[in-house]
Image (spheres, rainbow, N blue to C red):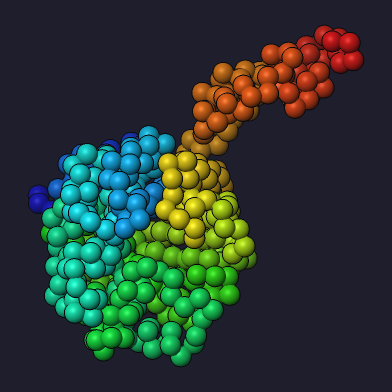
Amino acid sequence: MEYTTQMDAARKGIITKEMEIAAKKENMDVKELMEYMAKGQVIIPCNKLHTSIEPNAIGSMLKTKINVNLGISRDWKDMDMEIEKVNNAVKMGAESIMDLSSYGDTRTFRKRLTKECPAMIGTVPIYDAVVYYHKPLKEITSKEWIDIVRMHAEDGVDFMTIHCGINKATAGRFKANRRLTNIVSRGGSIIFAWMEMTGEENPFYEHYDEILDICREYDITMSLGDACRPGCLKDASDISQIEELVTLGELTARAWEKDVQVMVEGPGHMPMNQIAANMEIQKTICKGAPFYVLGPLVTDIAPGYDHITAAIGGAIAAASGASFLCYVTPAEHLRLPSLDDVKEGIIASRIAAHAADIAKGVKGAIEWDHQMSLARKKLDWEEMFDICIDPEKARRYRAEAKPEKEDTCSMCGNFCAVKNMNRILDGEIVNIYDE
Ligand code: SF4
């Protein structure tokens, strides 16, 4: 039997090889995974032309996945450096790379990614249109915006952020209910400016069916962009954000009518006490479509440490129903991230995802912690290094402050509670003072 998208296959009861691979990674029965996919609650972003992909499934009942944003910009044009970051990100456990390139030969970089990279590749066609057409924003036509979507599809990308939720109605509400930090989404600000200057409807909203036809043809997952995501705590859960979310809920249903896989993007900046409620609202309005969150950053006062503010919010979001976390680096709000920033961001995001997986009871998650605890109890540093999330850093820290005795660390030395408890429970004498 033939199928168009993974969702179409699931609805027809066809188990694809991508479903088999993804189910195996999740320790889940493939038929169960297929049933979630048929309902839109699990997706496998996987363009038919991205042949190097090692597929992963995204859904709130599965292991939380993480995305890493990379790409060349006017101020950072080194393509090889960006490819090195991509390779490092995949090695460090990122399941997804979003290419946010906004300068130069973006197509060559994008094609290189889909040719070589096993992670799922996402893009934002709005950025690329501005680079590709080399003309003032106002002069880009509706057709040209959509042509870029088709070009990215042909280049093999697995998912695209499409800012189709900010239609004229949402834009009107946004203008009537002003915010502290306006629109902070890069794509959202571009399309809002285009709508203001041309007086036309958002082309991604107006020609949504045409975009869905492209997605269906190549099996591209729609990542419904949140142009109105709050950019500061003051704007969180406001009228613009919720108005846009309602539109995204309607667009989710329209995509499913054409068997197009969907995920929905979310906040942003948000106080901790609002995150769980936001996840519930999204699940209700978007009927359980996977939620892809950009943070949320739980405070605005920590530039240089936003990998931490985002990890706190990401852990709460994922434990409350989000499926996919976009990493944030310490360079957020300050500059394009360096190789070290990328590493810090990935580790922070993976910790957030893992903490949420423990809370959700994802198979195998807490067992990793139990293994680590056993190694700690044995004071087996080599085993701890092998198990931990960042062996290089853990090994370096211990080496930088060697203890006098190998079976302790320089934190407590002879006072090592772990060592002393092991010994006393084994019937040995514990002196501490003269050891
Ligand atoms: S010395 Fe202290 S910190 Fe180090 S392993 Fe022992 S109890 Fe833990």
Q: Seen from this angle, which residue lies furthest front?
A: 75
Query: x, y (%) of residue 327?
Result: 45, 51
The residue closer to the viewer here, 381 or 277, is 381
Q: Seen from this angle, which residue lies furthest left?
A: 1
Q: Who's the residue at 39% across and 77% down the image?
A: 244
Query: x, y (%) of residue 133?
Result: 17, 68
Residue 112 appears in the rendering: yes
| Residue 119 sits in quarter | top left
Q: Who's the residue at 18% across and 42% down the image?
A: 115
Query: x, y (%) of residue 46?
Result: 23, 49
Q: Who's the residue at 23% across and 80% down the image?
A: 138
Judge whether 406 appears above or below 29 on screen. above
Residue 22 appears in the rendering: no
422 vs 73, left or right, is right
The residue closer to the viewer here, 342 or 322, is 342
The residue closer to the viewer here, 71 or 35, is 71
Q: Who's the residue at 62% across and 62% down the image?
A: 301
Judge whether 109 appears above or below 410 on screen. below
Judge whether 68 appears above or below 380 on screen. below
Judge whether 94 appears above or below 392 on screen. below
Q: How many marks?
A: 0
Query: x, y (%) of residue 53?
Result: 24, 41
227 vs 396, left or right, is left
